[in-house]
Image (cartoon, helix red, strand yellow):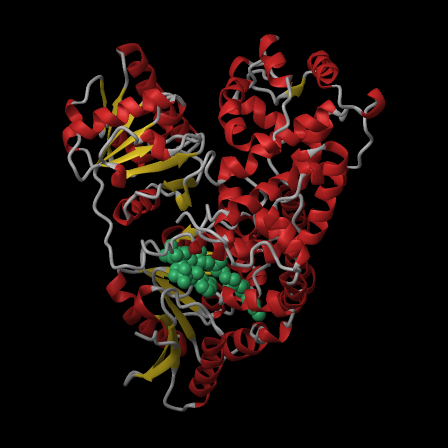
Amino acid sequence: MAKKIGVTMEVGNDGVAVITISNPPVNSLASPIISGLKEKFRDANQRIDVKAIVLIGNNGRFSGGFDINVFQQVHKTGDLSLMPEVSVELVCNLMEDSRKPLVAAVEGLALGGGLELAMACHARVAAPKAQLGLPELTLGVIPGFGGTQRLPRLVGLAKATDMILLSKSISSEEGQKLGLIDALVPPGDVLSTSRKWALDIAEGRKPFLRSLHRTDKIGSLSEARAILKTSRQLAKKIAPNMPQHHACIEVIEEGIIHGGYSGVLKEAEVFKQLVLSDTAKGLVHVFFAQRATSKVPNVTDVGLKPRPIKKVAVIGGGLMGSGIATALLLSNIRVVLKEINSEYLMKGIKSVEANMKGLVSRGKLTQDKAGKALSLFKGVLDYTEFKDVDMVIEAVIENIQLKQNIFKEIEKVCSPHCILASNTSTIDLDVIGEKTNSKDRIVGAHFFSPAHLMPLLEIVRSKNTSAQVILDLMAVGKAIKKVPVVVGNCIGFAVNRTFFPYSQAAHMLANLGVDLFRIDSVITSFGLPLGPFQLGDLAGHGIGLAVGPIYAKVYGDRMFRSPMTELLLKSGRNGKINGKGYYIYEKGSKPKPDPSVLSVVEESRKLTNIMPGGKPISVSDKEIVEMILFPVVNEACRVLDEGVVIRASDLDIASVLGMSFPSYRGGIVFWADTVGPKYIYERLKRLSETYGSFFKPSRYLEERAMNGMLLSESKSSRSRL
Ligand SMILES: CCCCC[C@H](O)CC(=O)SCCNC(=O)CCNC(=O)[C@H](O)C(C)(C)COP(=O)(O)OP(=O)(O)OC[C@H]1O[C@@H](n2cnc3c(N)ncnc32)[C@H](O)[C@@H]1OP(=O)(O)O
């Protein structure tokens, strides 16, 4: 059925014109909506039977803001004229400066341009729990319908900068306390109260307030300057590589110094510059890429419905198992945690409790909710409780035989509808399920550590996994607030496989004589939160050593074998776990580079003996980035070539959410396309001539470079999905 898009106006006998935005599902402000709003406001302002106006969104949602698809069109074409003129013509002239009072009836959500329209009204009436915010900075732009000027005038400068810079939304309850919302009423009363409020303003019983003209919440110039100074420091800390935060503060400041209208004009000018920035292109891509992950051909489009998952058994109470259990409990799913003995079980239970405590102490969870979640939790030592679970998630160590035995056992004790999932990060699912007759319900549920905090859930589908099982796990993933990305079965799956060259390349560079702390610093300046050596320390070097041979078996032709990890472990350094790796870890202080690790590095260099002429190579920071990340792009190309992901953008999301690849660079494939496949191919070819097959360009990259195609262009040769 075609969606009904448009703006309607109905004038009641009371003389109130109700203007309704309809653009399902979130009433985004697409071009026909903007022109419809202009037309209806013009009409309402001219009609003599209209005394006052109410603006409302259809279907219980005010508006999710300006249509983000338009930004994508602008990015594709570079044509700024695709963006309509709104901030002065509609928002100031037709709405705020209208002689007829205008009330926003806010239900569900008012975000971005949606909240900006509401703030241009002369009062706001809201239903409880409506979501209010200006999240534009997450898209690489700033609010563009006057939000940078009106929010500070309604809630005060400190709160407004906090909300805008951190893209933090608030509830209508908080909005009422702050003065953003004038009345909070039950959902059924929002429209009637708004009508009455509008008439009260028209008839002088309530004040006729124009947000942009207000100054009562701004404070003195020196107070404002002090707040903006703090905001600049915050921006430097949270967004060192992005332009929109600092630009936004400049725009706010313009309005403080020269008045709101001047701020509105500057906002429009800066908006146009930012919308074409690489940051906006990357972030808008990530927005749509994330939503695309929920569309899985032959799974989400074949009329299946997810089955309810109420009780889950987790096998293994280590770091991963306890994190997974925590994530499930937090979403009110009953969890049975199974361990092999009471000592391990107690450890697992304590880890779950500690996870909850950590969330409470950081203010992310109330004590009450933590208690409720823990009441759904039970530790067990046998399979008795497994008979009525809807899903099992195995999270034991990466040992093929152990996993095979577990799956053989759970197949017997669980009901036939029960989903049998493994949290393996490397092992082939077909091998895990080899000894069972339940291959259609075996699936990978690969969480990232810490599982209760990291947002990605990699759902691994073998050639036998049923569509229903995939759909069920996707629904569980969403219920526990993860972003599920469905991928095909191979060693390392999509994320770990794509990123296995990340630490290998770093090891090669270090063995070629480049300072490892410099490598970490260059990579963090590029935007990853941890450099490869910091990441190794965090994961623990024992893991690297354990999974190395599994990767070597299948990807051995393109591996760099460095003795450094083994030497590191021999010298008693297992990373953060034991307080010592490349860095020193002391409670309460930031990790410090450990100069004494350099003797280990020297020993490794002697053994590999790859420094040309025995001398360290000289490389620029740009070359470091290329030598570390181009091999990652190269492996991403193989992942795309083999159809391990449904679409290139899935790998972008997986890299952003699983590896914290900077979202403002759009994810690994998007970034590579920005750099250019031909350039990457040529650089890798040159590097492989000098340093060997580790850098050898893949067939996919070569083809794309030769044919002038982007890596993300869909023309996958094979598919595992
Ligand atoms: C001259 C131009 C100036 C513009 C100035 C203005 O200040 C700029 C803006 O307003 S930018 C937009 C600001 N708004 C946002 O950033 C909100 C983005 N959306 C969300 O956060 C969420 O989608 C949500 C909270 C509104 C709803 O979340 P929910 O989980 O319920 O649903 P989904 O996220 O899956 O979204 C459902 C579908 O709706 C599409 N969508 C959502 N918001 C927009 C939007 N603003 N524009 C276009 N499309 C939007 C989303 O893509 C989903 O589409 P599918 O096709 O995947 O179903």
- The residue depicted at 51 percent of the width and 59 percent of the height is 154
Q: Is residue 367 at all visible to an observer of this figure?
A: no
Residue 515 relative to residue 58: left or right: right
Residue 431 seen in this snapshot: yes
x and y, in percent, of residue 651 in the image: 51, 47
Image quadrant, ligand 1: bottom left
Q: Is residue 569 above or below residue 88?
A: above
Residue at position x 30%, y 74% in the image: 1
Quarter where residue 366 is shown: top left
Q: Out of 93 and 592, give the one closest to the viewer.
A: 592
Count all numbered tags in the image, as a single digit.
0
- Could you tell whether 167 is left or right of 377 in the image? right
Residue shown at the point (39%, 42%) measured from the top left: 482
Give left or right: position of 503 versus 346. Answer: right
Q: Position of residue 448 (x, y in %)?
A: 44, 33
List x then y, in percent, for residue 275.
Answer: 62, 62
